[in-house]
Image: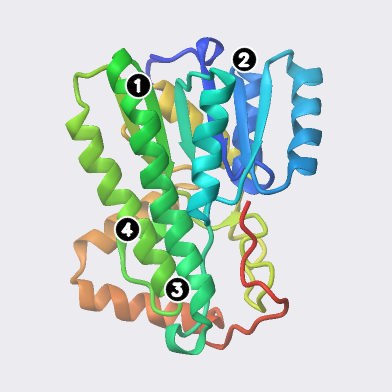
Amino acid sequence: MGTTVHDYRSTTALVTGASKGIGLATATALARRGADLVLVARSRTTLDGIAERLRADHGVSVRVIPADLADPGGVQEVLEGLRAGGITVDLLVNNAGTGSVGPHLERPLRPQLDSVSLNISALLTLTHHIGAGMRARGSGGIINIASTAAFQPMPFQASYAATKAFALSFSEALAEELRGSGVRVMVAHPGATATNFFDGTSAEIAAGLADSAEDVAEDVLDDYARGRTASYPGRVVNRVGTFVARALPRRTVTRLTGALNRKLGFHLAQDTAASHHPRS
């Protein structure tokens, strides 16, 4: 076990996508560790309920900023909410994300563009504005939630994997730019996680192959506390898989991933609801 270099009790953390899945689990784990919170998601009602519970259970300050981060206006609402509330963010957790499953050309374009807006543009904008304040103060941290999907092209999840590859490359580059500045950047790569990511489609994660959101959140926060720049939460096979993807030729990896996704039925994924994937 590594040495702990961060104490969350002195931290105000902003978590995006905080209403469900990994975001909710991360917010809960942060509150349990003593961090004050700013929760961002689309539903004020849901956020208010979560905030009330976390305040009662852990005695921390919890503020909410409802916003749809797939909309550039939503990102600005978050930044304005921080300014209006006089909130200084010590730890930014860019967790909110969405993706489309199925053949790219047979899927509606709008959800895929929303995925780019949320997974890339919102992450980039929040990091730029909030990170600038951290840089000026000489302290702070950013955790970007990418995915094991970041390490290889993924047929039938083409746009989603591409957005996560951006998060990986951007995070690694920014971590080096900020080395020695007092601001740390860590990128996390969950594998299959038991969340509602596939709600709205016929795709499913096979039972027993997914980590719990709670386990992922705890591992990510442990890794950040130990000063790591990369986190591979959940089962060991998640990290092993990224090594394989980096060792083999890209064409081979792409074909193998495409074969796996065909086996999982992703090439046949159909909508079962009006929207493709919920945005936290």
- Identified by mark 4, the residue type is Ala
Is residue 115 placed above or below 38 in the rendered structure? Answer: below
Looking at the image, do the residues carrying marks 1 and 3 touch, with CB atoms under 8 Å apart? no
Looking at the image, do the residues carrying marks 2 and 4 touch, with CB atoms under 8 Å apart? no
Residue 94 placed where, x, y %?
47, 41
Cα–Cα gap, marks 2 and 1: 20 Å
Mark 2 vs mark 3: which is more N-terminal? 2
Mark 2 vs mark 1: which is more N-terminal? 2
Write down the quadrant of residue 176 in the picture: top left
The 10 Å Cα crowd at callout 1, few under 14, some 14 to 19, many 20 or more, is many
Q: Residue at x 44, y 55 (%)?
A: 119
Secondary structure, mark 4, is helix
Cα–Cα gap, marks 2 and 3: 37 Å
Which residue lies under the disc numbered 4?
165
Secondary structure, mark 1, is helix
Which residue lies under the disc numbered 2?
34
- As drawn, is 70 to the left or to the right of 185? right
Residue 91 seen from this side: yes
Mark 4 vs mark 3: which is more N-terminal? 3
- The disc at residue 134 is 1
Secondary structure, mark 3, is loop
Residue 109 placed where, x, y %?
48, 79
- As drawn, is 249 to the left or to the right of 184? left
The 10 Å Cα crowd at callout 3, few under 14, some 14 to 19, many 20 or more, is many
- As drawn, is 233 to the left or to the right of 67? left
Cα–Cα gap, marks 1 and 3: 34 Å
- The disc at residue 157 is 3
Residue 234 seen from this side: no
